[in-house]
């Protein structure tokens, strides 16, 4: 198995036209989709809609990159979703509690961040501890933490939303104005993307994740501290997801125990459609950017064409299978 | 193995007993402890009504998990079972309503058509899954994620989310809520499915091939096993069993439902995993899966009877799934490999 990064220049040049078409299949598919929607509904390429899509895609990007951190190591995180709900509820409760006590804004926001990221860290340590420490299958471990988080989020919130998240929090992570024309979620997504790019490509930890995913035994034999790195991967995944949860909480302005409902499957779908392989060791920030954009564009186009929600679900299912099949072709050709 | 048999004496016997116990796992013990404790401390646990409820609800999970196990054995996954259940429910109910109008009075025919349509919808999803996995070599996780989305969308699209009423009385009161020899009908259905799968696993070529494929796909192909056929078969059987679950639930509820317990897929995988079915493929026995499904439902029932908040129950279940597998894993490591 050679991944794109390890291809030498002449090898790459020898690729046939078909090969290149396959490599570009996702961007091409996206362009074709947007243009054909444009023919029917010109609004799709209006500045407002494009900004809207980018905005939505930032959230998808954060969750999909969280998921990528563990998919790279041949794992996945089923608890991403219910953990996001728990983060949302916990941070909202911490903030509303302090607001009621009359605490200053800075303290309120700090408490929200600490509560949210703290929950994320705990989930990450639980998942990583069982996966890396005891060698239990990630599916089982994260299935367990999925249920634990589900119970926690509904218990501590009492089942309903936690209202009155302070405006200052929403301004900070959602609708504040820092730079004209660029929304805060987009800026956060870009920062996270740059950070992850550096982490995955220029640090020992990042490169080791690929090696662990490609061949766990080789990684261990080579003397990599695999367990510690695996642990970090799960921690990073849950922390990123928690941060995404805080962003969503800022957007809705309330702590929602059902916030993460479909996030788990969507995040895996976006990552995998972008080209992160469930076999581990293949993928990167670029893949997640494309995957998140694709998923968002698809649902945006269907919304604009007024496709009903049920039909959207069917089409999304078909597209996931087709996209992954194209990816499969791409990998066998490369 | 043989050197133990040669050494006669108490040590060898107890060692062999231990080894046998390790093979079966700790699940039966935990199950017995749970049942005895509940029977001693909560009298209502053994009341006829309660036993019926537990048996009926675990029957559904047993059928579903047996199918899930087959797919796990070939090294796959089926995330779509939880969506096939409502799809089969809706399709069968709508067919029966339609047939009730087309051939009024022919109850037998109406039910047969409904059942066939329900099973057919399951078979279609199973074929989609199996063909994509076997021939397109797409990851099972993604394929079944896609088909889950498709099946859910279909069920909702067909009904707009509104329950489908108007099935023949015989189907609901005769089968779904009926008792045969004092036991809910679903129990017989589950027993039948378990017996059939047990037979397949132990006495047929298909059973052995499924283990071989999951153990080492390449080796199975090289040895001349038609791996693709058997892969498709495993997925098809899994989806059909999910459809059977859907039919039984529809008969009990009395209407076709596009939204049925969203946790079914995860529960079926949890039951299989607690039963020691390996997610890497090649390992898994239906009798253990049956015990695990019973264990999960009895545990839920026990927590209900002890008035534990359902939200806290979810937390418990999560912990138990992880701990069960962790203990199993540790046990395996301590048993010497030979």
Image (cartoon, rainbow, N blue to C red):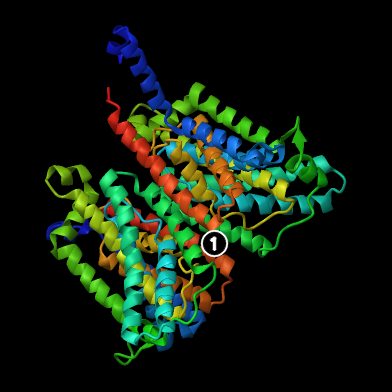
**In the image shown, does A76 or A31 lie closer to the viewer?**
A76
Chain letter behind tag 1: A
Residue A24 is situated, as x and y percent measured from the top left of the image, at 30, 65
Mark count: 1
Q: Is residue A239 left or right of residue B260?
A: left
Provide the residue designation for mark 1.
A314
Q: Residue at x 31, y 72 (%)?
A: A114
Tell me if I can see residue A83 in this picture.
yes
Q: Relative to B145, does residue B196 appear above or below in the rendering? A: above
Residue A241 is situated, as x and y percent measured from the top left of the image, at 35, 66
Q: Residue at x 66, y 63 (%)?
A: B161
- The image quadrant where one finds the C terminus of chain A is bottom left
Q: Residue furthest bottom?
A: A180
Q: Residue at x 29, y 53 (%)?
A: A128
Q: Secondary structure at mark 1?
A: helix
Q: Is residue A117 left or right of residue A199?
A: right
Residue B324 is situated, as x and y percent measured from the top left of the image, at 41, 40
Q: Is residue A63 left or right of residue B246?
A: left
Mark 1, Cα crowd under 10 Å, few <14 / some 14-19 / many 20+, is: many
Q: Relative to A284, does residue B169 appear above or below in the rendering? A: above
Residue B242 is situated, as x and y percent measured from the top left of the image, at 58, 44
**In the image shown, does B39 or B252 lie closer to the viewer?**
B39
Tell me if I can see residue A28 in this picture.
no
Q: Residue furthest front?
A: B41
Q: Quadrant of residue B135?
A: top left
Q: Relative to A255, does residue B28 appear above or below in the rendering? A: above
Q: Quadrant of residue A78?
A: bottom left
């Amino acid at each position: 198995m050679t991944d794109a990064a390890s291809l030498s220049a002449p090898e790459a040049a020898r690729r046939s036209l078909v090969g290149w078409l396959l490599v570009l299949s996702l961007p091409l598919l996206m362009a074709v989709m947007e243009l054909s929607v444009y023919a029917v509904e010109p609004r799709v390429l209006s500045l407002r809609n494009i900004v809207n899509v980018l905005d939505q895609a930032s959230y998808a990007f954060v969750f999909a990159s969280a998921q990528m951190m563990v998919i790279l190591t041949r794992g996945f995180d089923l608890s991403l979703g219910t953990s996001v709900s728990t983060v949302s509820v916990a941070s909202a409760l911490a903030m509303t509690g302090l607001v009621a006590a009359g605490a200053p804004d800075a303290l309120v926001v700090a408490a929200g961040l600490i509560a949210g990221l703290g929950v994320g860290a705990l989930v990450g340590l639980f998942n990583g501890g069982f996966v890396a420490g005891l060698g239990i299958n990630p599916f089982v471990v994260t299935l367990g933490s999925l249920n634990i988080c589900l119970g926690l989020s509904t218990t501590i919130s009492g089942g309903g939303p936690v209202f009155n998240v302070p405006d200052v929090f929403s301004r900070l992570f959602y609708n504040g104005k820092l730079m004209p024309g660029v929304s805060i979620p987009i800026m956060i997504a870009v920062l996270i993307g740059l950070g992850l790019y550096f982490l995955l490509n220029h640090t020992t930890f990042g490169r080791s994740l690929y090696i662990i995913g490609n061949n766990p035994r080789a990684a261990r034999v080579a003397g990599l501290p695999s367990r510690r790195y695996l642990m970090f991967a799960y921690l990073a995944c849950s922390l990123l997801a928690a941060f995404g949860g805080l962003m969503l909480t800022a957007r809705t302005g309330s702590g929602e125990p059902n916030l993460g409902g479909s996030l788990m499957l969507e995040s895996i779908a976006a990552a995998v459609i972008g080209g992160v392989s469930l076999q581990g060791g293949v993928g990167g920030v670029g893949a997640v950017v494309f995957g998140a954009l694709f998923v968002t564009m698809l649902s945006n186009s269907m919304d604009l064409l007024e496709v009903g929600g049920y039909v959207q679900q069917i089409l999304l299912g078909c597209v996931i299978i087709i996209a992954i099949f194209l990816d499969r072709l791409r990998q066998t050709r490369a | 193995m043989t050197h133990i048999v040669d050494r006669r004496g108490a040590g060898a016997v107890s060692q062999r007993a231990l080894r046998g116990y390790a093979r079966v796992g700790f699940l039966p013990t935990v199950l017995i402890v749970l049942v005895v404790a509940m029977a001693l401390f909560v009298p209502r646990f053994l009341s006829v009504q309660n036993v019926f409820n537990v048996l009926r609800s675990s029957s559904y999970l047993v059928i579903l998990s047996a199918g899930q196990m087959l797919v796990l054995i070939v090294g796959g996954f089926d995330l779509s079972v939880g969506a096939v259940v409502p799809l089969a429910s809706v399709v069968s109910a709508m067919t029966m309503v339609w047939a009730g109008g087309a051939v009024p009075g022919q109850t037998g025919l109406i039910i047969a058509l409904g059942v066939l349509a329900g099973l057919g919808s399951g078979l279609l999803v199973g074929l989609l899954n199996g063909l994509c996995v076997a021939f397109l070599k797409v990851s099972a996780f993604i394929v079944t994620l896609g088909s889950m989305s498709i099946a859910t969308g279909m069920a909702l699209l067909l009904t707009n989310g509104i329950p489908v009423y108007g099935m023949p009385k015989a189907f609901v009161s005769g089968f779904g809520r009926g008792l045969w020899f004092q036991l809910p009908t679903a129990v017989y259905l589950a027993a039948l499915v378990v017996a059939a799968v047990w037979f397949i696993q132990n006495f047929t070529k298909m059973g052995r091939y499924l283990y071989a494929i999951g153990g080492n796909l390449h080796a199975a192909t090289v040895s001349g096993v038609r791996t693709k056929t058997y892969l498709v078969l495993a997925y098809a059987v899994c989806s059909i069993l999910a459809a059977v679950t859907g039919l039984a639930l529809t008969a009990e509820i009395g209407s076709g439902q596009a939204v049925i317990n969203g946790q079914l897929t995860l529960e079926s995988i949890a039951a299989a995993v607690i039963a020691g079915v390996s997610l890497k493929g090649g390992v898994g026995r239906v009798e253990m899966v049956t015990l695990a499904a019973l264990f999960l439902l009895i545990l839920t029932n026990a927590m209900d009877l002890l008035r534990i908040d359902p939200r806290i129950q979810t937390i418990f279940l999560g912990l138990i799934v992880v701990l069960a597998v962790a203990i199993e894993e540790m046990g395996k490591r301590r048993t010497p490999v030979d």
